[in-house]
Image (tube, grey):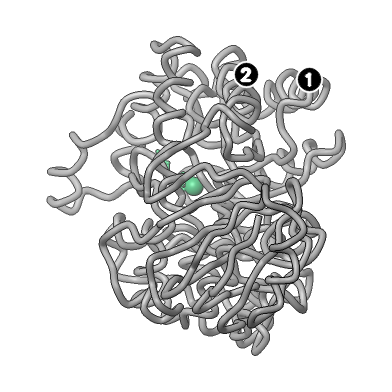
Amino acid sequence: MIIKNISCLATCAGSCPKIKNNLKDAGIINNAYIIIKNDKIAEVGSGDEYKKYLDSNSNIVVIDAEDKTVTPGLVDSHTHVVYAGSREMELPLKLKNVKYIDILKAGGGILSTVNSVRKTSLGKIEGETKKRLDTMLLHGTTTVESKSGYGLDFDNEIKMLQINKNLDRKHPISIISTYLGAHAIPEEFKNNRNGYIDFMINSVIPYVKEHNLAEFIDCFCEKGVYTAEEARKILEAGKKVGLKAKIHADEVESASAAELAGEIKAVSAEHLVSASDEGIKSLAQNKVAAVLLPTTSFYLMLNKFASARKMIEEGVIVALATDCNPGTSPTESLQTAMTFACFGLKMLPEEIINAMTINAAAAISREKEIGSIEVGKKADITIFDAKNLNYLIYHFGVNEVDMVIKNGTIVVKDGELINTAIK
Ligand code: NIG
Ligand code: FE
């Protein structure tokens, strides 16, 4: 396959992960071409040189990307895409300024989605999740991290992780699975939080590892949910059996979770809206990726975004994701996250695209296989109907995806799904 005449190719190649000033370098090539062989990128260049392949092989598929922007397939490195039901009934409460944590304490929020998941069959949730993955693919996303955390009891957490595994096999999008049993304290353990923590450590974590149901473990470390000490205990138990650590850190108020992420050398810390200065330093020193979720700050009406500029200045690996979930970020679109990253986090278009590709790949330990357009990497590519990167970010509120290629196969063409049966 040849993609030719690319007006703006953002390769996101070069130093990896990208920090400080390098985050501004999206490896742009104008008038570029890409050669794809099977599922891999075979050559990247500029001008007419691709023509050397045209005579020798008539089976070549040629795609003309004039006036288009081409990027690595987008990587959504933090989602809760597996869930049942929806939470639009919380909207009036939000507008009355009822706090997110207070809705949760009253048995709503995460716990209301837990009720929906417990009542709904694996097959039905899988079907609903597949639709959301289709929407993600249509919006240019080719790899998704997906967390459990709406089951909380044994059977329902395993059900969620099994859905991750099934959909990774059935859907073109690659799914990276995370066990998030520590998303809330379930109602049945309301007066026995240590009992729930012991249950996760002794019963669920070993099973998850043994059955290869997750690669990462996560914990919602936040005032009113899990303390830093509890998070340390849960994440260390996961690390002991070989799960890699992620942390929902300081999303609303600081719980010293960013500091903890550094201390336990987590792969990533996420949200970080209220991370302290020491926390930010700790992330930089320990090479913990900061996954920022600006749509969530907007949707929680926090009137505050994470200190992205400070993090970039300090040398933190900054990634961006949707946080797709039914409560605090009901969107599948990384293009929506682009808008809020620009106007909320004050990130530049080049920084945003790196943060959703190569740095996002680093946040899920996949930077060697995906996240940039370089020879030998997987041919996961998104083509936008935008004449340059600035235009892609500037034009907002619509889906600009023209084509998506996953593992060398066209899965979205003219903005519509095709070949979705092919992995
Ligand atoms: O990332 N903070 C915890 N988890 C999600 C929200 C989940 C929910 O409200 O259903 C988040 O914001
Ligand atoms: Fe989240």
Q: Quadrant of residue 326?
A: top left
Confirm whether residue 74 shows in the render.
yes
Quarter of the figure with the C terminus: top right
Circle number at residue 219: none
Camera-side residue of 186 and 204: 204
Query: Which residue is at a point 73% across and 47% down the rendered structure image?
Result: 39
Q: Where is residue 77 in the image (x, y as percent from the top left)?
A: 58, 52
Quarter of the figure with the N terminus: bottom right
SS for tag 2? helix
Residue 131 vs residue 79: left or right? left
Circle number at residue 158: 2
Q: Name the residue under label 1.
A: 211
Camera-side residue of 351 and 310: 351
Q: Quadrant of residue 391?
A: bottom left
Q: Do the residues labelled 1 and 2 touch (CB within 8 Å)?
A: yes
> Around disc 1, counting alpha carbons within 10 Å, would you say few (fewer than 14), some (14 to 19), or many (20 or more)?
few
Mark 1 is on which residue type? His
Q: Position of residue 92 (x, y in %)?
A: 12, 43
Query: Which residue is at a point 78% across and 20% down the rendered structure image?
Result: 211
Query: Which residue is at a point 45% across and 78% down the rendered structure image?
Result: 389
